[in-house]
Image (spheres, helix red, strand yellow):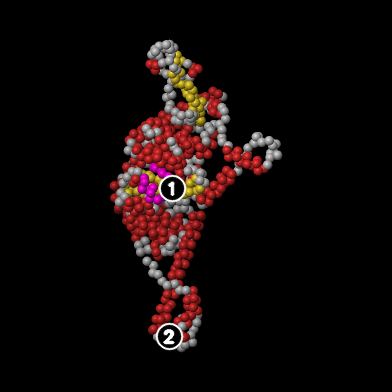
Amino acid sequence: MRRKTKRATQEEIQAFENSMHRRTDDADGSCSQGDPYLCNFTWLDDTALSALPYDLLLKTAAQYRDIIIGLLEDRKELTGAFRTVLERNNILITDEFGKKSEKLSVLLGGSQSDSRAPRDEDIDDGEERSAFGEDPVKSFDRDADKAKDKQEEPEACTDTSGSGSEDGHGQDDGEKEKKKEKKARTWKPVRSKGCLEKQCRDLPSIQKVIEMTEEELEKIFGKGNYRRMEGNDKEIIEYEYVPRTLYVRKTVLCAYEAVNKEADSVKKEMTVARNPVMRLRQHSRSTSSIWSLVLSQRYCLRLPWKRVASDLERDGLALTTQMMEENARFFYGILAALIQRMWYWLFLTGHIQIDETPVLMYDQRENILRQCYFWVFTVSELYDTDKPVTIFIYAAGKDTGVLRRYLVEDHTYTGYATTDGHNPYHIIEEETDGAVRNTGCLNHFRTKLARVLKAIPGLKQMTEDQLKQIPAFNVLSSLQLVFRKEKETKGMTAGERTEFRAKYVFPELEEAFAVLEGLEADDYGQGSLMHKALTYRDNQKDHLKRFMEDGSIPLTNSNSERRIAFFALLRNVSHFFGSDVMGKVGAGWETLAQTAKAFTDHVDIYFQYLLDEAVPFIRGEDSRKAVRHTAESRIDELEQNALAYFNDERLDRFMPWSAEYHAYEERRLRERRETAYLLASTHENRR
């Protein structure tokens, strides 16, 4: 603890400086009139000082002691503040013009480095980088102001209801502006009559006739007692999509009636053939292929809703952004049960990685900008599993309540969790009495030490002896060997990796921490880079060494950071979520998309598989039909209802690693090729 000392006043300091520049006329060097501030011994030599009375020297030294100590403390604080400002300035220059790397060879710019440092290609580069240059809050404020100005400006429209002339003469300017503003505020898009038929005429079409078999007709009408009613056939028009082609699918359901209607055993009313394809939503011409395309472009390619709508409109299909968001909410309310089953497979491993990243949410209803968070839970990259599940969740904060809900309250998790140094991860370990064991990330520790080197001016011109005098350089050299040795464990089993780490990796890590022994964070200025690095060492030392307990624990948390990196890149367009509900919906669809990417290159086909197979199954199982309502007030209720599917093994056939899905994917790819060939042949015949 730092010792508190008495600070000298400005008058005392001035008097002390004046006394140091005076010389007394007394031969014995005694003080005039007993004033201690008039004493000046700087001109005396050792012989004259030894001749002075001891009590006089002791009294004067005691009076000046507090003043001198206060000046030294002020100098130390000013030196620390100056060093901190210099570090920040060098960091800004390096981040702006230098290479964003933590490798010693890059930091030193090709100068001499430690002979123990490995080659560049032997070092794992897992640095967490900044994804944007400007302040996102300022850019959001600017975009919000533009949107607000655009909304306040009424659209130009022709008003023919007034009695004035065409150019508006004869009307009061104020009344004219009010009418325009009212009309712009109350205007709603109205679909013109016959627009659907016009779209169908402009798009290529494929017609399929569905007839009933003779066995079915004889069972209903009797043998030979039926006939076809061609004028009463039912036609179903739906939009379908194959890669790069939007077309219309016309399904004709044949109608039949009885010839002899007098018999009591004969069905007298008309019978229509049954459609073998179940419609996704009633009174909608959009099919699963259309919505799988929309969802994959939004949550896999991460295009804004307006971009997706404009692309479809260019192909000939008009879908509003409101319609897209409504259907995304609707299907999420159903497939939330499938995501709960994914939590089961994630917790079954006992080795997970967690990370979070801030996103800026622009609430369109309240017209405010809020900072929210996306969390990612994924299987450890070193855990040997054929089901690498990745789950995203949306939350308003990054406190312990999020971890408490998903790791303790909803379902109990027991095992390791590799994370960064965020405090809630340590709190959840204490609350669960060690059931959730937190392991640290060496990349974050290396990043803090690398920033210490980046802040040193003239680093690239230093010699090898000068570099070895810097503790951060010696620690980074040892950490490089740690990552180099860890890279050799690729392909080993968990047990083999544990033995190899104990023999080769752990000694290098101990040597890295030994370099920092004796260095305390209080020895450096508060807020300085070295102070932060040493504080991180003190708080995370035990967690950073916990990877020795199990070979499936990674040294870094880079895997989860790579999974959530795209959210950091989307910060400047994340306001397209528009509400907390769409944030939850987006996290749910990202879970399905990111998990499917590990097993297939056709995420849109997997989405279509879920819409064709999983949605009807889950809707049939839900006797309360809660999934039919997707209002914002019921999203939480829908998620709670889905918790019952955590242990439901029947949902495993809807997972992207199931054999049922792979068979469906092969069938869909074959149908796509056949449809594309048929459409191309139809186009040639038209020409």
Residue at 57% of width from left, 30% of height from top?
Answer: 192
Q: Is residue 280 above or below residue 507?
A: above
Give the spatial CA distance, label 1 vs label 2.
Answer: 75 Å
Crowding around mark 2 (Cα neighbors within 10 Å: few <14, some 14 to 19, many 20+) is few
Q: How many marks?
A: 2
Q: What percent of the width, then of the height, locates residue 651?
A: 35, 35
- Per the rendered image, the range of residues in magenta is 390-406
Residue 360 disc label: none
Image quarter of residue 452: bottom left
Q: Which residue is mark 1?
A: 396
Q: Is residue 173 above or below residue 83?
A: above
In x, y percent, where is residue 148? 56, 45
Indicate the quadrant containing the C terminus: top left, top right, bottom left or bottom right. top right
Q: Which label is found at residue 48?
A: 2
Going by the picture, which residue comes out furthest to the bottom? 27
In the image, 201 versus 220, the foreground residue is 220
Q: Amino acid at mark 1?
A: Ala
Q: In the visual, does 95 lie left or right of 480?
A: right
SS label for mark 1: loop
C-beta proximity under 8 Å, tags 1 and 2: no
Ranked by sequence position, the earlier of labels 1 and 2 is 2
The N terminus lies in quadrant: bottom left
Q: Quick one: 456 or 392, which is closer to the camera?
A: 392
Binning the other alpha carbons within 10 Å of mark 1 as few (below 14), some (14 to 19) or many (20 upward) gives some
At label 2, the amino acid type is: Ala
Residue at left 57%, top 43%? 151
Mark 2 secondary-structure assignment: helix
Q: Can you see residue 666?
A: no
Whether residue 41 is situated above or below residue 508 in the rendered picture: below
**In percent of the image, x 38 and y 44: which residue is there?**
378
